[in-house]
Image (tube, coloured by chain):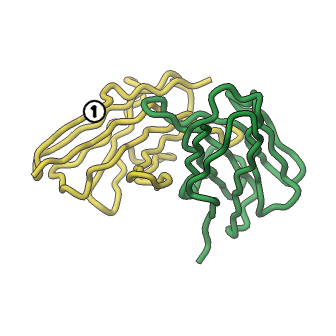
Amino acid sequence: AQSVTQLDSQVPVFEEAPVELRCNYSSSVSVYLFWYVQYPNQGLQLLLKYLSGSTLVESINGFEAEFNKSQTSFHLRKPSVHISDTAEYFCAVSETLGRLYFGRGTQLTVWP
Amino acid sequence: DGGITQSPKYLFRKEGQNVTLSCEQNLNHDAMYWYRQDPGQGLRLIYYSQIVNDFQKGDIAEGYSVSREKKESFPLTVTSAQKNPTAFYLCASSIRAGYYNEQFFGPGTRLTVL
């Protein structure tokens, strides 16, 4: 089974500052990687995913993540955050049969 | 609009009672999933179903039961055997069970057992 580690449970930043949310996974075999975002009392929404091809993937709202196979990492970055980015972010790894293994989540809080 | 609905959004039950959480999808997805979310724990898989009339236990199936009689419906019953049922429950679906298929999530049901 996969193990997904999100190294920071809380990340506070000021508006317009850059941010990096870290994610490491346990297996170096072929994997498929996802970042989901959750706003309070809501379900999860897919932010971006890595399936194959370019190791840098981008979302429509300015987030990007880079797949690093040698370091088994898939860190999420944004060069300038907004208050509306305040949410909990989950990294997930997929194996066969569609099972997703989730990290424990990182609460991003953006202060004005 | 296509999507996943979960009802109710908030549910209160007395200890010792069974309770069933509803999950319906109109996305024509084959696979459906139930997760439990607790603060600081991430999401843990309870049960999943790859196709109608078939389902498998996830990592924390004890005290829960499911059925998959229709493609669009995957109800979860929290039984009195579940020792700590208070949690946020999330239902998800994907086109089919496969590692390249993203999962779509419903809005969740917050269950509180008094």
- Quarter occupied by residue A69: top left
Foreground of the two, B56 or A62: B56
Foreground of the two, B38 or A63: B38
Judging by the rendered image, the residue that carries numbered circle 1 is A10
Foreground of the two, B44 or A79: B44
For label 1, the SS is strand
Name the image quarter holding the C terminus of chain B. top right
**Mark 1 crowd level (few <14, some 14–19, many ≥20, 10 Å Cα):** few
Q: Is residue A29 left or right of residue A37?
A: right
Percent coordinates x, y for residue B77 in the rendering: 76, 44
Figure chain in green: B
Image point 27% across, 50% down: which residue?
A86
* Amino acid type at mark 1: Gln
- Quarter occupied by residue B44: top right
Q: Colour of chain A?
A: yellow
Image point 68% across, 28% down: which residue?
B60
- Parent chain of label 1: A
With respect to residue A55, does A10 lie above or below?
above
Q: How many marks?
A: 1
Percent coordinates x, y for residue B7 in the rendering: 64, 60
Q: For the view shown, which residue lies furthest in the bottom direction?
A: B1
Percent coordinates x, y for residue A56 in the rendering: 34, 46
